[in-house]
Amino acid sequence: MEKVLVTRRISENALELIRNEGYGLSIYTENKDLTPAELIKMCEGHVGLLSVGPNKIDEHFLSSCKHLKGIALMSVGYDKVDVNAATKHGMPISNTPDVLSEATADTAFLLMLSVARKAFYMHKTIERGEWGFFDPMKNLGQELYGKTLGVLGLGRIGLELAKKAKAAYGMKVIYHNRSKNKNAEELLNATYVSFDDLLKRSDVLSVHVNLTEETKGMFNLTAFEKMKPNAIFINTARGAIHNEKDLMTVLQNKTIWGAGLDVTNPEPMDRNNPLLNMENVCILPHIGSATEETREKMAIMAAQNIIKALKGEQMPQVINP
Ligand code: DGY
């Protein structure tokens, strides 16, 4: 029986789809990520890989696993994949776009409001026994009503966040993309601006681009220093898009007001990282798409893709057609 390797426990419905097509399954369930060598070893005897988690699909992996007929990622991001190498090896790879846009936008929205009201830090003050008396000049956050939301990468997730921000707080939406998003301009009256203007004009700046050579380290000291003193920086995309040391510096110097991160570099973040104790910082452990509903949809989509690849058909969400 041909077998698929699934690198984490995922929805039973998704596994059932694969079984129902007559394929066997191996499921990796250890409480640690696989090393590249372990992943290659585990792929032996399998024809498909349903990759969940930070598995590197690079030249070394691809040349060691030529027996695979396809790889379905259970993520929208594919920065761990060397797409050119996969194409060269004729290895179809798919991702899980769209189904996680709302959940991820919710996470960005949650961080935006949490930073604005210092929510995570306030929680810690109670734990530390610092909730003493009412001081009207203490614990003050800022309001989002009528402020400007800047979106870097107004694609599916960025658009969902912009819709929520406009509906909830009447926020003005400005954005920077490789190309203009006419649909967003009509729907939200969003304005296309240069990256420099995005930095200078945003009260909240939320990042929704892929991690590429071009976006890696895009938010460094030079970029942060152009932002407003009341600005909130949100990153739910990939941690390597911001330079963490520079972010720490601008938060300490009060060059910008606060930051909300669902992604860090490296992940997991060290529990002693000073960012975790800063008043205007809220950090989550990469839970952008972590809802029961969304993870179910992602697992089903990944399962449908790997089944197609095993049948020699085009994966519906192939990234290297
Ligand atoms: C995604 O789908 O890319 C999420 O960030 C999980 O990796």
Image (cartoon, rainbow, N blue to C red):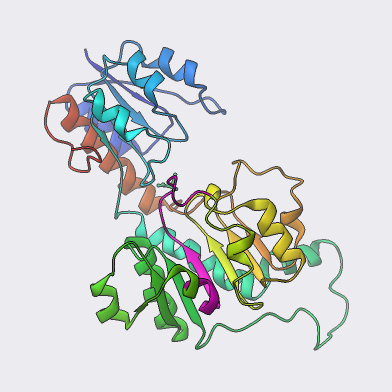
Residue 206: percent from the left, percent from the top? 49, 66
Residue 140: percent from the left, percent from the top? 73, 81
Q: Quadrant of residue 269?
A: top right
63 w.r.t. 142: above or below: above
Closer to us: 101 or 266: 266
Q: How many marks?
A: 0
Q: Is residue 213 magenta?
A: yes
In the picture, measured across the screen, residue 154 lies left or right of residue 216, that is left
Residue 3: percent from the left, percent from the top? 27, 18
Residue at the image position 40 percent from the left and 51 percent from the top: 210
Residue at the image position 26 percent from the left and 32 percent from the top: 16
Residue 111: percent from the left, percent from the top? 56, 65
Residue at the image position 57 percent from the left and 54 percent from the top: 242
106 w.r.t. 217: above or below: below
The magenta segment: 198-216
Q: Quadrant of the C terminus?
A: top left
Q: Quadrant of the N terminus?
A: top left
